[in-house]
Image (tube, rainbow, N blue to C red):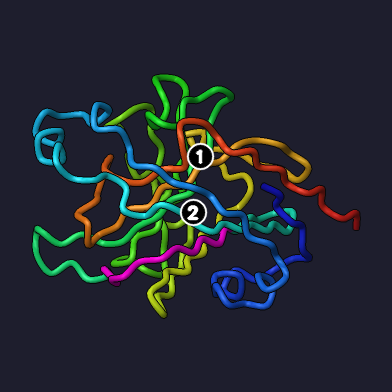
Amino acid sequence: MQVRYIPRFEVDAILDPDAAPWRDVESETVKLKGTPLDMQPTAAIKAMWSEKKIGAVEVVQVAAVHDGERIAFRLEWNDATENSEITDTTAFPDCCAILLPMVQYAPMAVMGAVGMGVNAWYWRADENGRGRHVVAEGLGTSRTIDYETVQGNGVYKNGRWQVVVTRALAVESPENPARLEPGQSTGFGVAIWEGEHGERAGIKAISGDDWIALDLAAAANG
């Protein structure tokens, strides 16, 4: 997928899924599949989902822009129900994440491995207006390192979620999260959790076993 360069944008503006910068950016259709049952970390989860479909959302539209300092992803997908309020322990929010390798060859489908981490830019509907900066080194190891670095905003209308998540291309952190730069080619992935379907944690739809090519346009000189 191509990440278009546009002149410097304001964070508050780019977080609006209907903002002008998004109108001329072509989206790419990304097919999703449920995480395999045998990849789930506990016997209890495997038993609970043995007769249920994992991965309620099967396709998502993705677009991305950067301004030389910050990158933003716009995701849009069909969802018959808006799950943005957690009223009891059996209710779960709609969520999405952009996944990026922290080192070359980090495995995506299993959320990394020891010494080969995956960085997730995570948004959830019950925390709309902010994002979570997450790292993982394998199934069941995901942890939030801060709530400030990633920003996210979602709008639900006409049976669809439109969500924007954004972060600086490079950030300083002891966790060494993914660093991006103009002109770079790397990979990315997408994860979607459908709250009405009871999806959470490792129960989700993902964009496949491997990374999708991500090419950042060079920044304009001057």
- In the picture, measured across the screen, residue 196 lies left or right of residue 174, that is left
Image quadrant in which the C terminus is located: bottom right
Please state which amino acid type lies under the numbered disc 1. Answer: Ser
Residue appearing at x 24%, y 45% in the figure: 53
| Residue 74 is inside the magenta segment | yes
Q: Is residue 16 above or below residue 76?
A: below
Q: Is residue 215 above or below residue 66?
A: above
Marks 2 and 1 sit apart, C-alpha to C-alpha, by: 10 Å
Residue appearing at x 47%, y 23% in the figure: 116
Q: Which residue is nearer to you in this view: 8 or 65?
A: 65
Q: Which residue is mark 2?
A: 149
Give the x, y percent position of residue 66. Answer: 69, 57
Q: In terms of secondary structure, where does tag 1 sit? A: loop
Q: Earlier in the sequence, mark 2 or mark 1?
A: 2
Q: Which residue is nearer to you in this view: 158 or 167?
A: 158
Q: Closer to the observer: label 2 or label 1?
A: 2
| Residue 107 is inside the magenta segment | no
Q: Which residue is nearer to you in this view: 95 or 52?
A: 52
Q: Is residue 86 above or below residue 1?
A: below
Give the x, y percent position of residue 121. Answer: 46, 50
Tell me the quarter of the picture where residue 14 sits: bottom right
Residue at the right extreme of this rendering: 222
Residue appearing at x 63%, y 48% in the figure: 169
Magenta stretch: give its range.
73-83
Tell me the quarter of the picture where residue 186 sits: top right
Is the Cβ of the residue at disc 2 closer than 8 Å to that at disc 1? Answer: yes
Q: Which residue is mark 1?
A: 173
Q: What crowding class fits label 1: few (fewer than 14 Cα within 10 Å), some (14-19), or many (20 or more)?
A: few
- In the picture, measured across the screen, residue 160 lies left or right of residue 80, that is right
Q: In terms of secondary structure, where does tag 2 sit? A: loop
